[in-house]
Amino acid sequence: MRTLCASTLIGEVFLIGFAGLVAMKDPDLAMSTVWTVSGVAMLLCVLLCGVITRPGGVQLGWALQIVLIASGFIVPTMFFMGAMFAALWWASVHYGRKIDEAKARFAAQTRSTTGTSPDAA
């Protein structure tokens, strides 16, 4: 799960950066505000990559998805892009967990047939 979720989050770093470039053209927004908010959001994405498997990590990821969708009020395209990345987040969590379960079953099966850990070799 960690790999899939981290890949989605790194993609979101780029998305947020590009959205910052678009928001920068809005005359009602100060450039410093745009880049402070964008920079903090990008940093949070990178930090979340490291804590995704800890308790609450997936929930923080969902909170980030909601914020990305809500950023559509500033950059309207983000309604669509945020929804697309929320779907990617769901798929990363859902299929990542299935992959983790399959790996655990395979490891248990390997241990029971050989009597050793698959990592012992």
Image (tube, grey):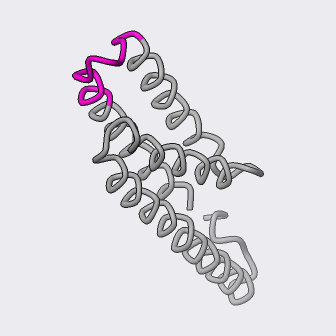
The residue sitting at 25% across, 26% down in the picture is 21
Q: Position of residue 54 (x, y in %)?
A: 73, 49
The residue sitting at 54% across, 68% down in the picture is 96
In screen coordinates, is 63 left or right of 108?
A: left
| Quadrant in the rendering for residue 101 | bottom right
Q: Which residues are magenta?
A: 20-32
Disc tally is 0
In screen coordinates, is 60 left or right of 81?
A: right
Q: Position of residue 22 (x, y in %)?
A: 24, 30
Camera-side residue of 68 and 45: 68
Q: Position of residue 72 (x, y in %)?
A: 38, 44
**Picture quarter with the N terminus:** bottom right
Q: Position of residue 112 (x, y in %)?
A: 74, 87
**Picture quarter with the C terminus:** bottom right
The residue sitting at 67% across, 76% down in the picture is 104
In screen coordinates, is 26 left or right of 46?
A: left
